[in-house]
Amino acid sequence: MKRCVFLTLTFLIAASNAAATGVHIVGGGTPNSNNTYPFWGIYPAFRWQTMWFQSELGEAGPVIKIEWQTWNNTNGGSYSNCDILLCHTNVKALTSTFATNYGGNTPVNVFKGTYTLSGYPVNTWVTIVEPKNFNYNNKDNLLMEVSWQGGSGRTNSMKVRNSGSPPFPGRIWNTSSKTATTGSVQASYHHYGRITIGYVGVAATSLGRVKSLFR
C-alpha cells in the first residue's frame, strides 16, 4: 500500500510541475490597427465572425481561454442575448455567408447569456471567454463567432492587423440582427489575440490535501 501511495504522489508532483498548457499568440504578427467590433453597443444587434489559422495554434487540446489586447482605453458595456461560438473549419478565408464559414461543421456554444465587458487601460490583455466544452483538433482552422441582441456601451478598441503580407482570414459582420444570414466582409483582417490550449495542471497547494487522503 505504501508503495502505491508513493507512486501516486510522485505522479501528482510531476504533473504539477509539468507545462500543462500552451499559450499561442495569434493574429499574423505585429498588430498595426484596431477595431471596435463586435462589442459596440451603439447598434441594435450584432453578428460577427473571425478566424485563426491552424498554423498559428499547432496544438490539439481543450481551448480554455481566448484573450484580446486593448488598443487604447476601453469603455466596456453590457450585451444581452449574447452567444459566443467556436467552430472547426476548413475554410481558408471568410465569405459573406455566416453558415458557409463553418465549413460543414457544427459550432459549439461556449458562452450564452448577458455578456459584460469591463473598461480597461491601453495594452491590457482582456479575457473574452473561458470555454469549458471545446476541444481543438489541430487540423482545421479555428472560427470564432459573437452575436448579441440589445447592447449598451461605447467603443472597445482591440488590436488587429489589417495590412502587410497575406494570408488574412478576414472577418464578417452584420449590425442589424444576431440571426442575419449574410454580412459585410473585410478580407484584409487578422484579429490579434492569445489562445490558451491544454489542461490545467495540479496546483502545488493541492498536494497537501492529496497526501492527507493516504495517511
Image (tube, grey):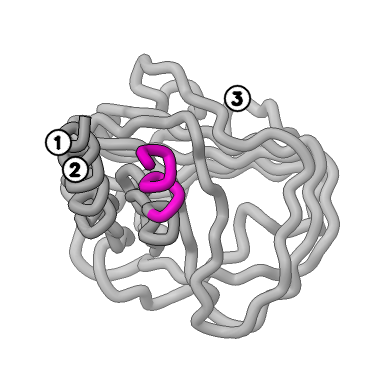
Q: Residues within 10 Å of mark 1 (few under 14, many from 20)?
A: few
* Residue 77 image position (x, y, % from top left): 78, 61
- How many numbered badges does the structure rendering display? 3
First of labels 1, 3 by sequence position: 1
Which quarter of the rendered picture does the C terminus lie within? top left
Q: Which residues are magenta?
A: 208-215
Q: Does residue 123 sit above or below 48 in this rendering?
A: below
Whether tag 1 and tag 2 are in contact, CB under 8 A, the answer is yes
**How far, Cα to Cα, is label 1 from label 3?**
61 Å
Q: Residue 184 vs residue 45: left or right?
A: left
* SS assignment at label 1: helix
Kindly identify the amino acid type of the residue bearing the numbered disc 1. Arg
* SS assignment at label 2: helix
To which residue does mark 2 refer? 6
Whether tag 1 and tag 3 are in contact, CB under 8 A, the answer is no
To which residue does mark 3 refer? 181
Q: Residue 127 vs residue 51: left or right?
A: right
* Residue 36 image position (x, y, % from top left): 61, 64
Q: Does residue 90 sit above or below 175 in this rendering?
A: above
Residue 167 visible from this viewpoint: no
Whether tag 2 and tag 3 are in contact, CB under 8 A, the answer is no
Residue pictured at 28% horizontal, 36% vertical: 61
* Residue 205 image position (x, y, % from top left): 43, 60
Q: Main secondary structure of the magenta part?
A: helix
Query: Does the magenta portion include 213?
Result: yes
**Between tags 2 and 3, which lies in front?**
2
The tag on residue 3 is 1
Residue pictured at 55% horizontal, 34% vertical: 110
* Residue 37 image position (x, y, % from top left): 61, 57
